[in-house]
Amino acid sequence: MDIKERIKKIKEKMKEKGISHYLVPTGDYHQSEYPGEYFKVRQWLSGFTGSNGDLLLSKEETALWTDGRYFIQAKKELSGNGISLYKMQMPGVPTLTQYLEDKAKKQGGILDLGFDGKVVSSHFVHHLADSFQKQGWKLNLHWKEDLSIGVWEDRPSLPKGHITVLPDSITGSSYKEKVQFVRDKMKEKGCNAHFLGKLDDIMWLLNIRGTDVDCNPVALSYIYLTMEECHLFLDKEKLTKEGEQYLEQEKIHCHSYEEIYSFSIGKKEDNKILYEEETTNYCIYQRLLEWGSLVKGENPTTRQKAIKNEVELENLRRIHILDGVAYTKFLYWLKGQSHIEKITEQSAAAYLEKQRKKMEGFMDLSFPTISAYGPHAALMHYSATQDQPTELKAEGLYLVDSGGQYMGGTTDITRTIVLGELTEEEKLHYTAVLKGMLRLSRAKFLQGCTGRNLDILARGPVWDLSIDYQCGTGHGIGYMLNVHEGPQGIRWKPLMDGKEAVIEPGMVTSNEPGVYVEGSHGIRIENELICKKGDENQYGQFLYFETLTMAPIDLKGIQIEQLEKEEIEQLNKYHEEVFEKLSPYLTKEEKDWLAMETKKISIMNT
Amino acid sequence: MDIKERIKKIKEKMKEKGISHYLVPTGDYHQSEYPGEYFKVRQWLSGFTGSNGDLLLSKEETALWTDGRYFIQAKKELSGNGISLYKMQMPGVPTLTQYLEDKAKKQGGILDLGFDGKVVSSHFVHHLADSFQKQGWKLNLHWKEDLSIGVWEDRPSLPKGHITVLPDSITGSSYKEKVQFVRDKMKEKGCNAHFLGKLDDIMWLLNIRGTDVDCNPVALSYIYLTMEECHLFLDKEKLTKEGEQYLEQEKIHCHSYEEIYSFSIGKKEDNKILYEEETTNYCIYQRLLEWGSLVKGENPTTRQKAIKNEVELENLRRIHILDGVAYTKFLYWLKGQSHIEKITEQSAAAYLEKQRKKMEGFMDLSFPTISAYGPHAALMHYSATQDQPTELKAEGLYLVDSGGQYMGGTTDITRTIVLGELTEEEKLHYTAVLKGMLRLSRAKFLQGCTGRNLDILARGPVWDLSIDYQCGTGHGIGYMLNVHEGPQGIRWKPLMDGKEAVIEPGMVTSNEPGVYVEGSHGIRIENELICKKGDENQYGQFLYFETLTMAPIDLKGIQIEQLEKEEIEQLNKYHEEVFEKLSPYLTKEEKDWLAMETKKISIMNT
């Protein structure tokens, strides 16, 4: 059944049920960023494979919203399927909500909206409902059914990945400590219960990791926490004996995953339940209403998880060296090829993965490697497997964005590699990206800053060329968890929900400005940064960044005369550290090569 | 009658009327930043002369709240009058609202609060009332009377300053165009009437200027605008014949200033009135309730007034050259003194004012000149007149922050002048401030940025030294209007109300980073910037700044080796422009001197 056929079938079901608009967002039952295969209804129905997109079906139109990372890719993947592309945050393009409001307006202030209530957040529904109420319009919700059931015939089943319990030497903080922290926060908010549906928060709280989603070490689960009890909803067959013993010992009551919808608790009137609107799906929200009175608020785990403790930071420093060694061995191999044409984007990515697998504690990639040569790199989240094998050539730029899950942390690194001759434009762009990356890395700022205060440091040199990279500059990174993690981020525009987290000591954030020229080239240089405490005085607590990522930055792309003195010094110092930390793990040949790649530059040697 | 006597009389009146708490804020009937003499009830009643303070009288206590700028001064001025000082934002000090809540709590959840409803914003009252309502407490408001009437015997009368009607060559946009714009905005918000109480907005809309408040060319007035009519409440004796004719010709109905409280309009049920809570006083708010249903929202004039049109910008460029000429003549004179010790902060400020007065179109200062030598400059809002005359010396730094009102615009400029030997620390600080000022001036950014995105460009070099200037980097500036004007600003923290305006083409904003070291020195370098359109492409509309302020920056404070190549080029280019634009207005001697002061610098000549 092709895409058009699938859309047709769903639209038929819509008509049957009197649903004029049906929304298929990207998401699992937990509002995860990377849903497992079972949850990829939007991809199945639209053909669009990007990681972010909302599909809306109506009689008049099939429409997809996605963000700047995917404009080019979406255009390509949607072509021929009769799906309109709505480019998020571009001038004149309505948001999904505005679109629905326009429709309601045209229909005399009434709209029927269907969706699977398990994959849509209660936040989205309430936000939309509020907006309709303000206008005095009527919104009829049909939230009880996933219309793809019965149409999507070869749908994958729910994952049954095994679970690992982490030792204290890895977590740096026990479940008892963490759960006490959460209960203290519940108390502060006047609550005696807490629903937690965010998968990485659950893993962090319980000090366990799962294997239900590729690259994201999580297990499908929910937690209902009271002041005395912890109810975990997770399929027991995922647990080893050790895992079962651990839960027992910690007095965590384990129920099946689906039981969240039938579980019943007593004394409703006494329950004051803290829940996070954004990560609680609408079906569960409806359950919670039956369980007690609700208090909206952030999951206390989210901020606490983002602030890495000293044990986590030490492990991160260690595994980042290993990851840098693997990356450097890959670079050495690549740069040493006499016939680079025999290498494809795929084979290069495979070689890199092989190097990572040799490293102690390596478990998995942290996301599918982006191995993108030439114009492919202009697609920010290009996936090499989706096309014909592309061979590298001894010219232009090659971008590799990749990372690993290690016992001891998660990595995310991008380098753009010079394979041969570059145009002056490519060099100009490469230099601007490097300048931005360096400038943000050396930022010093007062506690209280959010990413919005800092973004222009990285983006400024790119803006100076009248270019923008249409995405954030940086994201938080999990610890043996999701490669994208909140609450902090570095971006210049506020998010839709207006929430902005302060950057705090212990947080790990990526720094990845870029330039993407459609049809030509893409450049991104990405290091991870730890936020650390600097001076404290009458003005407050000053903060700065320590760079975690250790791998050479290709000097051949740089127009040295465009760099300021301070930037040259900073780059030289970084390269000195890279050599010092990585060289003990390299062969003589690799070491000699790395010494060359990290040699000091100066205005003189241009 | 001394202060104690005045307080006693007011408290007697409170007792008579059953008012347990009586509030006297700083403010006129329009919530202006600088109230005129008539409105200085708080000063009359407390003896405290600072520009910010709330006085609260009760049976138990007389209490004054003020901010950090005034702690020392307030302590001195309040001493002996039995008034307690509440230091705003100091740990453990309740806010006025918290104080009132504590009182209510102690009194069993009930409080009587009196104030002159004409000088308190409806926003403040609603905020307090909401907070009481949430606690289930009762707040009895007595807002109809100014208790100082009859007690303050020699109270100045309301100002009767004359009014000027501006020609199109100055305004660039007629009243008809402006009022059409406002009516369009009213319509967009579903309103058919608008109350406007903000004085500078009224002046802008009507293309008139007043002389009721020192340095702020406004006239006390209100506007009630409908789709067909414009009712102006302004004392007619302020108008010249020409002014009267102008109003007549524009069909503006002129009522007396006080008539706003007796004016009556028909058909209440049809009126939907747009009003701004923050700048509408509580008495008028009560009137508006009788006139129709109310819609809260920003005055449409505020943003539009901030976006200067081409005629205004051309006039601004012209008068900034004149202002720069005056400033340069002042600098030439100052630097040429063989016996600088004979000059005081006051006499220097007077000399500068004399130079400005010689310029064509000069009308008034735009604020009282800050002329601050050595440690005095560490007080951001130092006023030279409040102390003994301070003589300058041939050493250290001297800060002059000043500006003029011209027929054709308002200026605001700060230079920090090197009078002789500097310490290395002073030079380091001076260079950091200059770097920040230059960096922000050369920013290029996408439309959509607020001041929060840009602030770190100016503040970063100061933060790099673990120092902060504890105020914003920049404020909007009126056009022949208030030197502080919204809605935009450049600061790193969001304001209390969370409002943040996007920086738009045509807005004029100051750029004034600084370093303030208590007891030692203060440095601020301030240029005004016009936001302009740069490239427009697939990424959006790029913006950049044009510098309006034309005056040399003292090169003697700079550690050239701390400047980056780009900064040196930028400073040289700026100085070249300063010389080119100012020299035609200077004598031969002044010109030769300015050529030296604006000479090109390079790393080589350190």
Image (spheres, coloured by chain):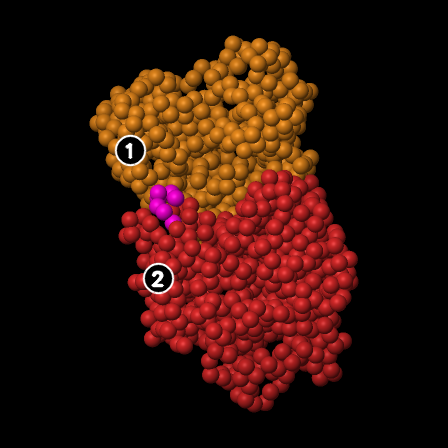
Chain colours: A orange, B red
Residue found at x 62% / y 79%: B352
Q: Is residue A267 above or below residue B332?
A: above
Percent across and percent down for residue A552 are 51, 45
Q: What crowding class fits label 2: few (fewer than 14 Cα within 10 Å), some (14-19), or many (20 or more)?
A: some
Disc 2: host chain: B
Which residue is tagged 1?
Answer: A192
- Image check: A133 left or right of B366? left
The residue range painted magenta reads B133-139
Query: B385 or B61, which lies in front?
Result: B61
Mark 2, residue position: B15
Foreground residue among B452 and A465: B452
Task: Left or right? Give the position of A268 relative to B184.
Answer: left
Q: Residue at x 60, y 74 (%)?
A: B554
Instruction: Give coordinates of residue A605: x percent, y percent.
Output: 61, 57
Say whether mark 1 and mark 2 are on the same chain: no
Residue at point 44% right, 64% down? Answer: B147
Above or below residue A300? Residue A20 is: above
Q: Is residue A263 magenta?
A: no
Q: Quadrant of the N terminus of chain A?
A: top right
Residue type pointed to by label 2: Lys
